Image (cartoon, helix red, strand yellow):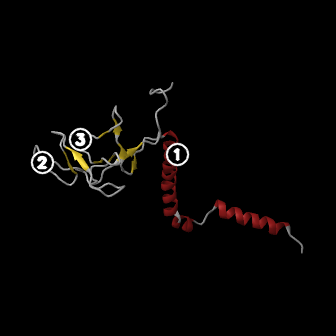
Amino acid sequence: MVFAAGDAWGQILEWLQGIIIPDWNNLIQLLPLFVILGLTGPLLSLLALYWLYHAFIDRGGHVHIDEIGPIPAELGPGGAPIFPPNVPYCIDHALVFPPTERTCSVDGNLLTVRCPVDGNVRTADEQTCRVCGTRYQLGASLSPVAIRRKRQPPEGGAAVA
């Protein structure tokens, strides 16, 4: 098999002719693809760069919704629990419940509520105080929300320089 110098040179010239003098019909058919890639490519790149910038600069100020459950009541000076007014509580377990709860999650008993006007104690499913006649409804919001902090402030309470 003998290679002629003219055949190799001819092949190089044919390859160069395809690059230097392109087939314009095929390029015109590819023009919409070039326009779409030329517009969306830089936009997607800028969007990805902005997302990375935001991910590195973000300080974590997001709201995290937490499940609301009973919390222990504050203890007074004698060690007896102190229950806030107009909030359901279980006196047996010293737990304060969210406003939408009516029964204790530990034993299933009815919760009690202290009237904010006169301090009279009633069950959580009663909507009117028997003594003063104040009518109110616990749990105005049917979907209570508790917000959980992701990070705590630095020790000392102020920003550390």
Secondary structure under badge 2?
loop
Q: Residue flagged by tag 2: what amino acid is it? A: Arg
- Which quarter of the figure has residue 21? bottom right
Tag 1's secondary structure? Answer: helix
* 89 to 33, vertically: above or below: above
Task: Please identify, in this view, whether the residue under mark 1 or under mark 3 is nearer the observer.
Answer: 3
* 7 on left or right of 67: right
Name which of mark 3 and mark 2 comes first in the sequence: 3
Considering every residue shown, the one lying at the far bottom of the view is 1
Mark 2 or mark 1: name the one nearer the start of the chain.
1
Question: What residue do we see at 50% from left, 44% from top?
Answer: 55
Judged from this view, the residue extending furthest toward the top is 161
Where disc 3 sits, the SS reads loop
Residue 100: x %, y % from top left = 27, 53
Circle nearer the viewer, 2 or 1:
2
Q: Nearer the viewer, residue 17 or 78?
A: 78
Determine the residue positioned at 75% across, 64% down. Answer: 12
Which residue is tagged 1?
52
Query: For mark 2, does the 10 Å Cα neighbourhood hold few (<14), some (14 to 19), or many (20 or more) residues?
Result: few
Residue at 19% x, 40% y is: 119
Residue depth check, mark 3 versus mark 2: number of the one nearer the observer: 2
Residue extending farthest to the right is: 1
Asked where in the image residue 14 lies, by quadrant, the reply is: bottom right
Measure how far apart labels 2 and 1 are at the Cα level. Answer: 61 Å
Q: Which residue is mark 2?
A: 130
Mark 1–mark 3 distance (CA, rounded to whole Å): 49 Å
